Amino acid sequence: MKIIFNKYEGTGNDFIIIRNSPAVIDHSDRLLIRKLCDRRFGIGADGLMLIEEYEGYDFGMFYFNSDGSPGAMCGNGARCAAHFAMKNITGFRDLSFLAGDGPHTAINKGGDIIEVSITDVTEFRETPDGFLTNTGVPHLVVFTDNNENADMVSFGRPLRYSARYAPNGVNVNLVSVADGRLRVRTYERGVEDETLSCGTGVTASAIAAVKTGKIVTDRTEVSVRGGTLSINFALTGNGATGIFLTGPATFVFSGETEI
């Protein structure tokens, strides 16, 4: 069977997007999802999203990591999914969608710039390794003077698989601060490598930076290896609310593939 796919990227974090209504891909088919995401034997991507009809929302977003495992939320992926829906389903208007961690909104800010809401952060705590929070998926934030030359696989993988964060593991962000601006590098579980950008990781890092006094603004631009993202939010006693992630969601190409 042939299916149509779209390839998107958000600051270098790349995704396969498939409109799965009517359903042609089973959510439990991890082998197929892994094959489609394979950069040598498939289309190639950090993750795959199935866009489906969902009552009460403009669409449902079902996200899968490149190893086939499901993910509750992906910030860069959500922006790309929203842009795809605006381009192909709803028109370029404000919309709402459902992800694994709950409802979200998306706004087109002009061109390929999309703003999406991030679920409220309700827990923030320090661990022996850094600061742990959840921005739709769990993130560990570790601050360093300079992360530019870090080997993120060697640094991130032991923490990702640490018994401290078992059984599901954690995404690992290494963050440096200079002149009030954050630079974030992320090792992502499910990809099991560093990605060029992680939207939920950038969000977690910005909240951690304000919580710990590394920066003093709750509206900041963050540099990642694939570009720049903007975060704004309001701190609460145990986390943050009113969280919005803004950045590019860029269509790359579309095509057909056999499954």
Image (cartoon, rainbow, N blue to C red):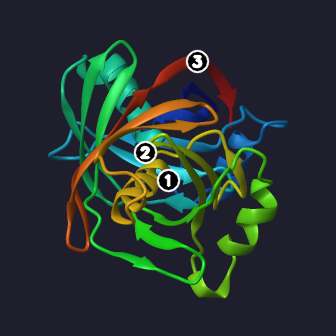
> Of helix, strand and loop, which one carries label 2?
helix
Residue behind mark 2:
75
Residue 116, how many percent across, how many down? 30, 39
Cβ–Cβ under 8 Å for marks 2 and 1? yes
Instruction: Spot the residue most to the top.
Output: 111
Residue behind mark 3:
252
Cβ–Cβ under 8 Å for marks 3 and 2? no
- From this view, report whether residue 62 is shown above or below residue 129: above
Mark carried by residue 85: none
Identify the amino acid type marked 2: Gly
Residue behind mark 1:
201
* Residue 166 visible (yes or no): no
Q: Which residue is drawn at 64% across and 39% down?
A: 196
- From this view, report whether residue 22 is shown above or below residue 159: above
Of the numbered discs 3 and 1, the one sitting upstream in the chain is 1
Residue 2, how many percent across, how many down? 63, 28
The quarter of the image holding the C terminus is top right
